[in-house]
Structure formats: structure tokens, C-alpha cells
């Protein structure tokens, strides 16, 4: 399959979550009955978990949070689904210089932690599009629970077929969501299309390091059939070919590569990946140490 083809419809069945290896995690997993989404082979199948919203609430309750007074910081271990967690979200927002009132499209925005942070801490209005129905459902529930539905909306959609008019947004935001997408040329051309002139693209993304191949399993793929990383040079050239101009480009591998829940606290990676998380964390560490995967955050201008 050439890199020019869209492979999102050909992802494997997920590794299912099971009881994990700490008392908290075992208790959490035993309380949930999450299973794979059953809508055919797709990225939604890989990522999706039924009952995710309730699983997150159960984990928050177990950690002593008051569900009737939740804050974005209470939720942060559960809803920023990328290495570095909320800190990397805030760091990217500062790098992009986000200001109140901006209309942002978060592509592959998952459970909505980044979107809610951009709304609460930066005063932005955020539309989140994500392929995985169970995430959109859970994200909508969490946004409503925090009283943010007037500033953050969630909808199911494919990053390669963004259902928006040309020039609709001031910022396209995307964190750790393009790894399963082969046709990155089309992806970034779509970002360019929905941005207004003078807009920004803010991204955080794992990319191929100088040593290849990566060691599997990865957070986003059990094998090479569904992981489509390119090197930083290839990514930057390709994004600029789509019409963007680089404003900032930082290798942040040393800052934010680890899952945001490596301590005793349960986090979203544990909930979604279950027992598979131990192998994913091991290969993730090797991929960073051996320079097989690097993490880049970048901001581009849309002329
Ligand atoms: C690791 S999660 C990151 C979620 C979120 N960006 C964050 O940082 O918290 C990857 C997300 O990408 C989404 N995704 C993968 N392929 C997609 C596609 N083609 N269109 C839209 N979303 C996609 C998945 O459903 C998942 O929510």
C-alpha cells in the first residue's frame, strides 16, 4: 500500500482491556464492561471502548474526586490522551499564542481534554471532530458535566473528510491523531482548506526517528500495517507543500514522550489499553531511547 492511500478503514481489531496489574487498575477494570466497537474494521475499532465515559467517572470517584464539582484539572489524567498530558497541551497553546474568542477545530480530539483546556484557560471556542464514536459520546458527556457545552462541541467525523466549509476556523489543532493516517498529504490539505487566511495550524505528533523500524506494540498500532509515521523533515516539507509556513518547530521528545499516567494514578492509557499497556510502555521507552520515534510540536501559519 502506498503512503498516498487512506488506510483508516483497514485497521486491526483492538487489543482489549482486561484487569491490570495494580489494585486500583484491577478494581477499575473489574467495574467496567468495555468492549470493542463493532462497526467494522476502522480506526474507531482500534481506539474505541464502549462504556468509556462511565469508566472515567468510576476512576475519578475511586481517586476521591467529587463528580458534581469536577474541574479540568481533575479530569486531566483521563482526557489528555497523549504523552505529556495537560502540560503538553498548555505548552502547545502558549507556543501558538492562542487568544480568547478564537474558533478552533480540534482534529482527532478524542475525549476532549485539550478542547476543554483551550476553552477554560484560553477562552477559545472549540469544535472537536473524532472518528471514534465512543470517544465522542464520552467527550460530550464530560463537556456537559463541566458546563462547557456552549464553548466546546463534539462530533463524529473523519479527519480526511472534514465536514466544514472552507475558511471556517482560525486555528486547526491536532495532537497525536495522525499516526494511523497514511494519506497525510490529503490530511494537511484539508487542514489548509478549513482554515481562514491568517489562521494557524498547531500540532503535536509522533514522527519517525533516525533509527527504524519502531518497536511494536505502539500506543496506536499493534504492528506496522497500521502505523504511518514519517520523519520530521518529510513532515515539515509535506505540510509546507500543503501551503503552510512554519512558525515554530520543536523536538519535544525529551519532554513529553511518556504516557501521562506512569505513576500510581490510573490514566486514560490504562483504561483504554488495559493489560496491553505494560508492553506498550516498554516499547515506547525503547523507541525513545533508541531514537526510533521522536515527538514534535509545531505551529504553522496559513497565509
Ligand atoms: C491518541 S488519541 C489522541 C486524542 C486527543 N487528540 C488527545 O490528545 O487527547 C488519537 C485519536 O485520533 C483519533 N483518530 C484516528 N484517526 C482518525 C481519523 N481518521 N479521523 C478522526 N480522528 C481520528 C482517534 O479516534 C483518537 O481519538
Image: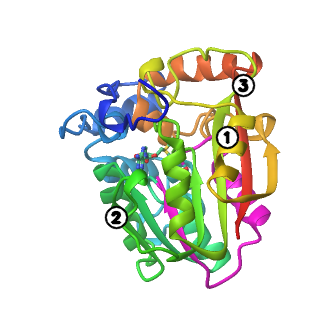
**In what element is the residue under mark 2?**
strand
- Position of 176 with respect to 19 (left or right) is right
Element type at marker 3?
A: loop
In the image, the segment drawn in magenta is 81-109
At numbered mark 1, what does the secondary structure look like: helix, strand or loop?
A: helix
* Residue 235, label in figure: 1
For the C terminus, the quadrant is bottom right
In the rendered image, which quarter contains the N terminus? Answer: top left
Disc number placed over residue 155 in the picture, else none = 2
- Per the image, is 98 magenta? yes
Find out whether the residues at labels 1 and 2 contact each other: C-beta distance under 8 Å: no
Magenta residue check for 247: no
Relative depth, front residue between 217 and 65: 217
User: Which residue does the numbered mark 3 point to in the structure image?
Assistant: 209
The picture places residue 181, in percent across and down from the top left corner, at 46, 38
Q: Nearer the viewer, residue 27 or 117?
A: 117
Does the residue tagged 2 have its C-beta within 8 Å of any atom of ligand 1? no
For the point 37% across and 73% down, the residue is 144
- Can you see residue 75? no
Q: Earlier in the sequence, mark 1 or mark 2?
A: 2
Disc assigned to residue 136: none
In the rendered image, residue 165, in percent from the top left (x then y), is placed at 42, 75
CA gap between label 1 and label 2 equals 27 Å
Which of disc 2 and disc 3 is earlier in sequence? 2
In percent of width and height, residue 136 lies at: 34, 58
Amino acid at each position: 500500500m502506498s503512503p498516498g492511500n487512506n488506510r483508516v478503514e483497514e485497521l486491526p481489531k483492538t487489543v482489549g482491556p482486561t484487569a491490570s496489574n495494580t489494585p486500583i487498575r484491577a478494581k477499575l477494570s473489574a467495574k467496567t464492561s468495555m468492549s470493542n466497537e463493532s462497526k467494522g474494521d476502522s480506526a474507531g475499532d482500534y481506539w474505541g471502548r464502549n462504556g468509556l465515559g462511565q469508566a472515567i467517572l468510576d476512576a475519578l470517584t475511586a481517586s476521591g474526586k467529587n463528580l458534581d464539582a469536577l474541574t479540568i484539572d481533575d479530569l486531566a489524567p483521563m482526557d489528555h490522551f497523549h504523552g505529556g498530558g495537560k502540560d503538553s497541551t498548555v505548552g502547545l497553546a502558549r507556543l501558538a499564542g492562542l487568544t480568547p474568542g478564537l474558533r478552533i477545530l480540534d482534529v482527532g480530539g478524542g475525549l476532549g481534554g485539550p478542547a476543554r483546556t483551550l476553552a477554560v484557560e484560553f477562552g477559545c471556542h472549540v469544535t472537536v471532530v473524532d472518528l471514534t464514536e465512543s470517544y465522542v459520546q464520552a467527550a460530550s458527556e464530560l463537556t456537559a458535566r463541566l458546563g462547557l457545552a456552549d464553548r466546546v462541541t463534539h462530533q463524529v467525523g473523519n479527519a480526511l473528510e472534514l465536514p466544514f466549509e472552507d475558511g471556517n476556523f482560525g486555528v486547526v489543532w491536532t495532537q497525536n491523531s495522525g499516526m494511523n493516517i497514511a494519506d497525510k498529504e490529503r490530511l494537511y490539505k484539508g487542514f489548509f482548506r478549513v482554515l481562514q487566511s491568517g489562521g494557524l495550524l498547531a500540532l503535536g505528533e509522533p514522527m519517525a526517528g533516525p533509527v527504524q523500524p519502531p518497536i511494536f506494540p505502539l500506543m496506536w498500532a499493534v504492528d506496522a500495517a497500521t502505523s504511518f509515521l514519517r520523519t520530521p523533515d518529510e513532515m515539515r516539507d509535506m505540510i509546507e507543500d500543503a501551503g503552510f509556513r512554519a512558525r515554530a518547530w520543536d523536538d519535544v521528545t525529551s519532554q513529553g514522550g511518556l504516557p501521562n499516567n506512569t505513576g500510581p494514578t490510573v490514566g486514560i492509557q490504562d483504561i483504554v489499553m488495559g493489560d496491553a499497556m505494560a508492553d506498550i510502555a516498554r516499547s515506547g521507552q525503547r523507541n525513545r531511547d533508541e531514537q526510533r520515534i521522536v515527538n514534535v510540536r509545531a505551529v504553522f501559519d496559513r497565509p
